[in-house]
Image: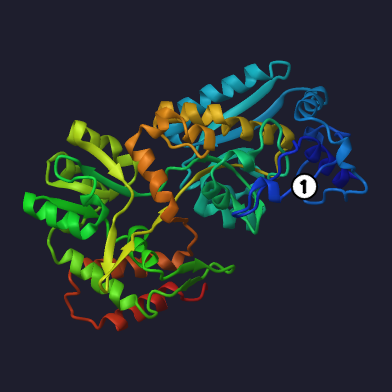
């Protein structure tokens, strides 16, 4: 009986909008529908009642599904006593999240909430959650590359209900891909700005110059300046190999499949050697890059939104940003690819107030909340309407990231990737000092990247 109760409760909250799987539009995935709730969410722990066991259509006619406002009213009416929840947000997001939590309490003032806000970086959320899933926060923010492990551990409630807006229809496609596993949506997109693109000083480069990396090197050389990229970092060197059509994918067991040593791989390696041999396109870490920009030595760099203020301060009115340029591989222009990154909000399926936790996750990631987060912290929205606003579109870094999105893929890679890719980047950025045969170098790299998980 409990399984049916939770399933009907969650389904009651659904609007007519559908939840899209990876790459699918909302229209292609109709929402499951069920009768109104029989029991409040607070009395039906998710650990005992998987939402996936929604009653069949003959048990729950679509015509009986209530409107979202009715579902919220039912949730309120069936709530007795204080609603206790814990929320985790990053240290940098504490002030803005506090404001949102106060707004949420005011919106549902008929209910007494006891919400504890804790500080947890999106980059480490998975490790903390998986230490004890049942004791983890009811609602928490995390980086999208953690989603597979969180789903496998049963630490994310599938998004099977829409209370106030259609999550799948309201967010950009890339963020939905990042928030999904096996075609099922498991998180609420919060930001769409954890990627990289090209910053540049427009007093040095024209808009045409920055279309080609080779042209940029020519111009920067003439000006006696540098172009920087953290080539000795797997996150960035991926841009070259993926851009040339050589793939890196994550397997179900956490291992990787990599084709960097396939036909054409040595051409990509040689292209990187050619670029760095100029002495103009230099391997440089993030902190050093910030210093060199400020000192006027670096006039263009591959980096992310977190370096926007540094570049804007240094270049003033000449501050500009755009998608990554093309680079030549065996004489052919290839568009540099990139990893796209998203920050997501997840709901713990062990929450004792599952319905409220899902409603809160929606609130923390709705259009207005994402607009406010951009205004407060400069973080790019995943919400389509928020991302299309004049304020967001006039931000050079966010606009460049959106332009690069067409050539970006969500980061899905096993742990064995990072060290071999870093070593490869170091060797190529330093000019392959040992003169290692490039095919041998790539074979060794791929052997490490694709090593079995022990």
Q: Is residue 373 left or right of residue 150?
A: left
Is residue 79 at all visible to an observer of this figure?
yes
Q: Return the residue at label 1.
A: 51
Q: Position of residue 385 (x, y in %)?
A: 53, 33
- Label 1 sits on a secondary structure element that is loop
When asked about the image quadrant of residue 282, the answer is bottom left
> In the rendered view, would you say 40 is above or below 442?
above
Q: How many C-alpha atoms fall within 10 Å of the one at disc 1: few (<14), some, or many (≥20)?
A: many
Q: Nearer the viewer, residue 350 or 423?
A: 423
Relative image position of residue 157 (x, y in whole percent): 68, 46
Q: Is residue 340 above or below residue 419?
A: above
Q: Choose between 134 and 200: the one closer to the eye.
A: 200
User: The N terminus lies in which quarter of the figure?
Assistant: top right
Does residue 37 lie above or below 58 as drawn? above
Which residue sits at x=21%, y=53%?
Answer: 228
Depth check: 159 or 270 in front?
270
Name the residue at 42% across, 26% down: 376
Where residue 353 sits: x, y (%)? 73, 34
């Amino acid at each position: 009986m409990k399984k049916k109760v939770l399933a009907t409760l969650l389904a009651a909250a659904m609007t007519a909008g559908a939840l899209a799987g990876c790459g699918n539009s909302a229209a292609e995935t109709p929402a499951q529908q069920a009768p109104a709730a029989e029991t409040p969410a607070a009395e039906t722990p998710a650990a005992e009642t998987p939402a996936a066991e929604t009653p069949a259509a003959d048990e729950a006619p679509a015509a009986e599904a209530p409107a979202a406002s009715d579902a919220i009213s039912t949730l309120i009416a069936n709530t007795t006593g204080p609603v206790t929840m814990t929320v985790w947000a990053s240290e940098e997001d504490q002030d803005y999240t506090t404001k949102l939590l106060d707004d949420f309490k005011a919106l549902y003032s008929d209910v007494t909430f006891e919400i504890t806000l804790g500080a947890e970086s999106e980059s480490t959320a998975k490790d903390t959650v998986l230490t004890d899933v049942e004791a983890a926060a009811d609602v928490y923010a995390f980086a999208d590359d953690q989603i597979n492990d969180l789903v496998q551990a049963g630490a994310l409630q599938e998004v099977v209900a829409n209370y106030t807006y259609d999550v799948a229809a309201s967010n950009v496609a890339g963020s939905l891909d990042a928030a999904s596993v096996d075609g099922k949506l498991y998180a609420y997109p919060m930001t769409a700005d954890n990627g990289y693109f090209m910053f540049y000083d427009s007093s040095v480069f024209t808009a045409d110059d920055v279309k080609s990396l080779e042209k940029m090197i020519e111009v920067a050389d003439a000006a006696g300046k540098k172009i920087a990229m953290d080539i000795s970092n797997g996150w960035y060197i991926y841009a070259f190999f993926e851009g040339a059509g050589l793939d890196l994918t994550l397997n179900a067991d956490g291992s990787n499949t990599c084709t960097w040593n396939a036909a054409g791989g040595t051409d990509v390696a040689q292209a990187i050697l050619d670029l760095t041999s100029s002495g103009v396109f230099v391997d440089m870490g993030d902190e050093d890059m910030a210093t060199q920009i400020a000192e006027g030595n670096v006039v263009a760099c591959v980096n992310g939104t977190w370096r926007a203020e540094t570049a804007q301060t240094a270049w003033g009115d000449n501050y500009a940003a755009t998608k990554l340029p093309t680079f030549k591989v065996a004489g052919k222009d290839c568009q540099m690819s990139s990893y796209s990154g998203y920050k997501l909000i997840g709901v713990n399926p062990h929450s004792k107030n599952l319905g409220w936790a899902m409603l809160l996750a929606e609130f923390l990631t709705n259009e207005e909340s994402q607009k406010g987060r951009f205004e407060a912290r400069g973080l790019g929205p995943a919400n389509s309407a928020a991302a299309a606003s004049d304020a967001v579109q006039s931000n050079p870094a966010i606009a460049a990231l959106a332009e690069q999105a067409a050539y970006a893929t969500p980061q899905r890679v096993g742990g064995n990737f990072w060290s071999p890719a870093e070593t490869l980047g170091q060797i190529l950025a330093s000019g392959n000092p040992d003169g290692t045969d490039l095919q041998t170098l790539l074979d060794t790299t791929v052997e490490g990247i694709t090593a079995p998980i022990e």
